[in-house]
Each structure stands twice: as structure tokens, then as C-alpha cells.
Amino acid sequence: MGAGRRLAGWPYYRVANHRRRWQHRVPCGAGNTGSQPLLKRVVVFHHPHSEGAAIFAGQFAQELERRSVKVFVADAWEQAATAHVELADLVVCIGGDGTVLRAARVTVPHAVPILGVNMGRLGFLTDLSPRDLFNRIERVIAGDWRMEERLMVRSDVFDGPDRPEQVFHGLNDVVISRQAPGRPIYVDVRIDNALLAVYRCDGVIIATPTGSTGYSLSAGGPILAPTEHHLLVTPVAAHLALARSLVLQPESVVDLRVTSDHGAILSVDGQEDLPVSSGVRVSVRQSEHITRFVRFAEPASFYAELAERLAEGLADLGRAARTGLR
């Protein structure tokens, strides 16, 4: 995609002079009692490879402009959008869970709430359909919604004993996995400096409660309610070792170290990948940052919603098996 579009006179702000944080804003749900919209600036992200999502993003942006809201539209992977996110009151993600995961990392550390609009498949992280979004546009602008906070995971990559070389934050999970098919890796796993195991495996997943319904679940891990404050350690295809997931204490730190010569990959939310060589230490813990989601419905049973989403997923797989289309 090309550069993000600057709509309704959205200026190129000098970021250094406009440090705004969520706690300085009008609380959500307070409603709009004046003539001006409560939300002044909105960033609209769309999936970079979905023409339908891009078109809908433009249509929604025009509706916001008509209501005196300044809008910046971009695909979710556009680097130039980061500065605009810092100044935004809301990020709207149009696509699927992958688009939301990308937005969650971009909003670190600005604490900007995210509203997900599902144009993908399951949509565990999205709250509205495109039709629902248009029907609720006045409530969106007025801030007439509740906030749901989700735990994030932080991974520090050390190539030496001192400062980390790189730091990543994710909403779903951090995974160390093998690069070459058929060649397992050895991963030394320590929790709070105590050796848990040296896994001969395809990989090790450290998942948040949000990520517990993703890769960790497919590897046999448990499902945690999304507002819990625990991380999961789930080995993938571990051989002759403890092959069950562990639920960690909130303050626990997991150290992962690849001890084999076979190449490994560190992946954050399945979107950011970093080659990891033997001896490199990856320290994983709860992030100091959180993701905030906009929700319109009252809190429902997580388990009822989970059953509904999983049933939708099975139906999609059934249709794909019958038609050969996805």
C-alpha cells in the first residue's frame, strides 16, 4: 500500500511537542454533552491485502469527517502511522485478528484504545461487524462504550550478560521454534532461575490469556479467561519431556535459551520474526504495557462466547473441506 492518507486536514504534528497519555483524556463512557465530538482524532487501520477492508476504511473515515473528527487512514503495517497513533483518541482496526494484533503493538506505549471490526474469519479480538460499526457511529464518537484491558507479554533478547539487544511486546504470544522442518531444537527453559526442562521440541510458546486460544491451544494448552493475569508455557511436540502447559504466577520470569546448533526463530504474535542462534537468551515476562479494547455489549459469559466462536471456526473448516475454498 502507499502512504497513509491524511484526511480532513489532519496535520503533521511534531510528536515531541504533543505528548498525550490516556489518563489526561476525558474518561470513556462520559458521553458528549457539548457540540464538539468527544473523539477528536481517530486512526483507521485496515488489512494491507484486503481491498474490501481498504474501501470500507475510506467510507468510515468519510463518515467521521462529516462529524468533525480528524482521521488518518493507513494499512496496519505502515510505519509512518506510528506518530499518528500517539496523538489519536481511538484506533479502529478493520480486518481480522492479525490487524488487531499489529495495532496492539503499535499502540505501545500510548495506551490508545482499539476498536476491532471483523472482516476476517473467527475474529476473537474484534467487537463489531461493518454494519454494526455504522449503526454505532454516534456512540463511537461520543465515547459511549466500556473499556476492556488485556495483558501483554514482553520479551528481552540478550546476546550477552547485560542490556537486551532487542525488546518486543506482544498481545498473543512469544514463540521460539525450529527453522528447518524435521529438525527439532533444544530449548533450556528456566522459570524464576529454576530449571524446568531442556526440551527437545519443535518450539516453546509463552502465551498470554488472550493468546491462549491461539497457537498454544492448538499445541494442547489450556484456555484462560482473557482478563486473567497469568502467562502460559506450552511446549510444541516435546520429546521425552514434560509435555504439559504450565500456568505461571503473575510475577514470574521465563528464560529461554536455544542450546542446539539448529537454527531457531523468535516470533512475536506470529508477525515479528528474529533469528535466534545457540546461546542467545530470551527473557519473557508480563509486559508493563496493556492493550485496551473498546466494547459495546455488557460483559457476557466468556465461555459462551468462546463456544460460539469455536463453532463458527468449525463451520468455516467444514465449508472449506466441502468447497476447497477458504
Image (cartoon, rainbow, N blue to C red):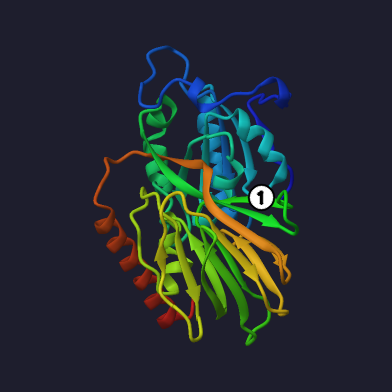
Q: How many marks?
A: 1
Q: Is any atom of residue 213 visible in this view?
A: yes
Viewer-proximal residue among 167 and 192: 192
Residue 109 x %, y %: 59, 37
Q: For numbered disc 1, what is the local secondary structure?
A: strand
User: Who's the residue at 60% across and 57% down the image?
Assistant: 283
Residue at mark 1: 167
Viewer-proximal residue among 60 and 26: 26
Residue 145 position (above or below residue 154): above
| Drawn side of residue 69 relative to residue 264, left or right | left
User: Who's the residue at 62% across and 32% down the image?
Assistant: 86
Viewer-proximal residue among 6 and 199: 199
Residue 89 position (above or below residue 183): above
Say few, some or many: other residues with alpha carbon within 10 Å of mark 1 (under 14 / 14 to 19 / 20 or more). few
Return the residue found at the far front: 194
Viewer-proximal residue among 276 and 43: 276
Residue 187 position (above or below residue 190): below
User: Who's the residue at 55% across and 33% down the image?
Assistant: 62
Residue 285 x %, y %: 53, 52
Residue 216 x %, y %: 45, 68
| Drawn side of residue 291 relative to residue 223, left or right | right
Mark 1 is on which residue type? Val
Q: Is any atom of residue 326 visible in this view?
A: no
User: Who's the residue at 55% across and 68% down the image?
Assistant: 189
